[in-house]
Amino acid sequence: MGDLQWILRTTDTARAAQLARALGISPLLAQLMVNRGITDIDSARSFLTCDLASLADPFLMRDMDRAVERIERALRHGESIVVYGDYDVDGQTAAAVLVSVLRELSSNPAAISFYIPNRMDEGYGLHAAALKSLAGKAELVITVDCGIASLEEAVLARQWGLDLIITDHHQPGPEVPAALAVLNPKRPGCSYPEKQLAGVGIAFRLAQALGRSRGRDFHEYLDLVALGTVADLVPLLGENRILVKRGLERLAATSRCGLKALMEVADVGDAVRASDLGFRLGPRLNAAGRLSDPSLAVRLLLTDDPQVAQELAARLNAENATRQDIERRITAEAVEAITARRLHEQQGIVVAGEGWHPGVIGIVASRLVEQFYRPTVVISLADGLGTGSGRSIAGFDLYGGLAQCSHLLERFGGHTMAAGLTVRGDKLESFSAAFVEVCARTLSDDQLRPRLYIDAEVQLAEVTEQLVEELAVLEPTGFGNPAPVLQVAGSVADWRCVGRQGSHLKFTLRDSENCERQAIAFGQAEQAGTLVSWQEHTAVAFVPTINEWQGARTVQLQVKAIAEASPRDDYISRAMGAYPWVLAGEYYLSPFVQAELLGEAPKGVDTRGRGGFLDLRGAWNKVGALEKYASPQDPVLILVNSAAEAMHLCRELRIAFPKRREKIGFVHEHLSAGELAELKELDIEWLVSTGAGFPEGHTWHSVWLWHPPLNKDNRDAWLRFAGGSAQVVLVFGPKDVRSAQLNLSKCLPDRRGLARIYALLRQPAEHGGLTTATAEGCLAEVGLERGLWFAAQVFAEIGLWHVEKDRIAYLPAPAKKLDLYEAVLYNRGMNIRRQSSFYLRECLQRGFIDDGFEAEN
């Protein structure tokens, strides 16, 4: 899809396996949680349970005690309290929560009111004129979702006799306002652990702090908390996830007539999801703040009159439709201006227009980011002043970028991904140049390509109702906790455009096993031609969902993107597509060491007559050396010490040389006869190998010793591939020697290591038998998995284990204590470790290959 980068997330498979076992969940679900940074068992359990009891003590928030003390005094004495909120959904819901709680607790509920500034007339934040109008009418002003940058206003409030408490979640500046209390988890010195609460989340924690002495938790307000949290695009992790998860449950059965009326006009059913809050309810509440009177939304959330609720909801619905029309017009004008001036070819975009409605420019900025994928600021000009709203992309801190241009701005605020600003018209050009320069310094070309992160590759048969139900535990998904995106490949059996305007693409995906699934790509009808081009082998990135139609439930792929899958289906391509691999420990053992252990060591060979050797030992960039000295057209053999290293190096080289990707392959002793037969049919020019299990009949232009041989027999066997004319290139170095020594110690554990393996596997063996796969999984947790093959051979020899195919059985312990030094295989293994350690050090010596050839440097 365009220049979209598909990035398969790498996963700590051992950690995922640990979570899966501890929590009784599938490996895939565990992998998805690790991908989201949830790596320890306690965090994972908290993520899954979403227990409200896990919320931190609200009094950990700096100044909470001072805020509660002042509010309690006001409540007791029936003082006039004004809740001053922002005009977006976060501010509206925060105001509704706090006003409701204060009215419930006050001895004089009528003394509790709210004030929401008008976006067009007053703009964002705490305003001196508003405070002055409240002076003499109110004794206490509590801000929600604003105020952290209002230094001057806090001073004025004190002069005018107003006590001021600020609650805000935006990034504080170097100085915080001199208010009676400032509640913001991002403040320096604030020990409250959750730093990403929305404004409504902070208001709710304040309400809970007030309720503690009364035995009230105020959970009945979680429906409003969830709405504001999702709408404000804070990460749905940690406490935000808990608040939204439990708030969605409340919202589905809400008794608030305002929310009921809003859900009805927005066509939201009983099964409310986070996406409904962000894309259906939120925009309608926001419409009031963007176009007209934001207090309408707060009145809707507070009313207990069904008739009033229906009237207000209908009005907000109409406002939202108007907002959509205005947004479409301004977006079209902005796109025209950007393309005409080729602003999209810069690393950042600043676009301005006279008379653009300031209430929708934030949404327009989001649309422009979707289209051009650049940090974008949209500015509405009026009377020589510009009101701007910006949106960012991954890797660019918008707030920090604006801070570098602050000398050109009247004011600004926000956070990493979104911000607002005010700029004088005569400084607009200078600001635009400065902002683009900051973007250019910060962002690379690669960062300016949109990315689609894939959580896992799956087979089509794995996409089932059971999978969808299991992944539902990740809900609520959204910002910070995206819906899991999976990847699958197959052929397109049929396709058609659907929808009222034919804007959606529907098709059937079928894999090589004849498994089929229906797929729907919303708004991607333009991809039909591309889909046909890739019809035989298509890669699909999707979110698994359930489609319910006329009482029938079917699994459906909700398509995020489509691309051409790898056109080749050979063992190399299949292996590369399965990365990251979980390989048996035997894959890390040199075939020459394994042969020597079993008494089958290869014979030495006569290596005379080679075409010379090139000594590049110690080269810091081996891949660069390969590019420099190996001709792309000539056959090259690259020798490594183990099957695992052959696969990893093959992958590394295919990434490093993308144009030669299909010409680079691997071969090792664990390949099947069918895979070796496939190799003969492939046009491989650079082959990575262990030198064992290798088909005869190949002639090489050069043979590269990527790793040091582990003994003389290993060396001679490798040199045999040079034949009569191939050049031998030595490219290993001290790091490779250390790595080989460490790997040998892992593959051939000593007495202590064997004892640990024996002890660790006894308990799982007593619970239903032990497979080698299970054994390796257990040992992987302590880094001993590579030693399983050697342990199995030694324990079988001395009668501790019975090993048959892939199963291990513990035998009764002998009456007489066994002596490992009586085991032939153990002694051979320890001897190999000692001899290889000495030989590996010799590999770095100048004369380690002395056949009369002079090194070429």
Image (cartoon, helix red, strand yellow):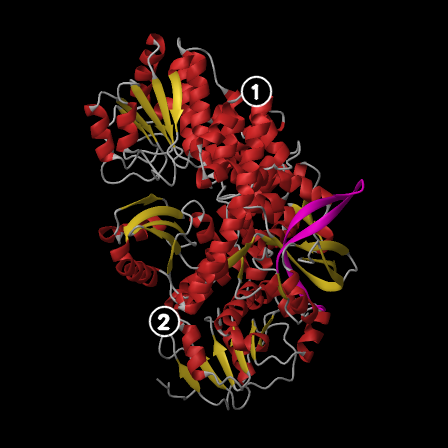
Q: Is residue 540 highlighted in magenta?
A: yes
| Quadrant location of the C terminus in the rendered image | bottom left
Mark 2: which amino acid? Answer: Trp
Q: Main secondary structure of the magenta part?
A: strand
Which residue shows up at 30% across the image and 16% down it?
70
The answer to whether one can see residue 241 in this image is yes
Q: Nearer the viewer, mark 1 or mark 2?
A: 1
| Quadrant location of the N terminus in the rendered image | bottom right
Q: Position of residue 49 (x, y in %)?
A: 56, 30
Q: Position of residue 659 (x, y in %)?
A: 53, 77
Q: Is residue 552 above or below residue 609?
A: above
Which residue shows up at 58% across the image and 62% down it?
597
The answer to whether one can see residue 34 in this image is no
Q: Is residue 598 above or below residue 604?
A: above
Decide which of 681, 144 is in the foreground and name it.
Answer: 144
| Secondary structure state at the residue bearing disc 2 | loop
Decide which of 634, 237 is in the foreground and name it.
Answer: 237
Q: Position of residue 170 (x, y in %)?
A: 35, 38
The disc at residue 343 is none
Q: Is residue 393 highlighted in magenta?
A: no
Q: Is residue 387 above or below residue 814?
A: below
**In the visual, does 441 lie left or right of 537?**
left
Q: Is residue 840 above or below residue 752?
A: below
Residue assigned mark 2: 620
Circle nearer the N terminus (1, 2): 1
Residue assigned mark 1: 305
| Labelled pair 1, 2 in contact (Cβ < 8 Å) | no
| Range covered by the magenta-colored residues | 535-561
How much space separates mark 1 and mark 2, taking CA atoms?
Answer: 76 Å
Which residue shows up at 35% across the image and 18% down it?
81
Mark 1: which amino acid? Answer: Asp
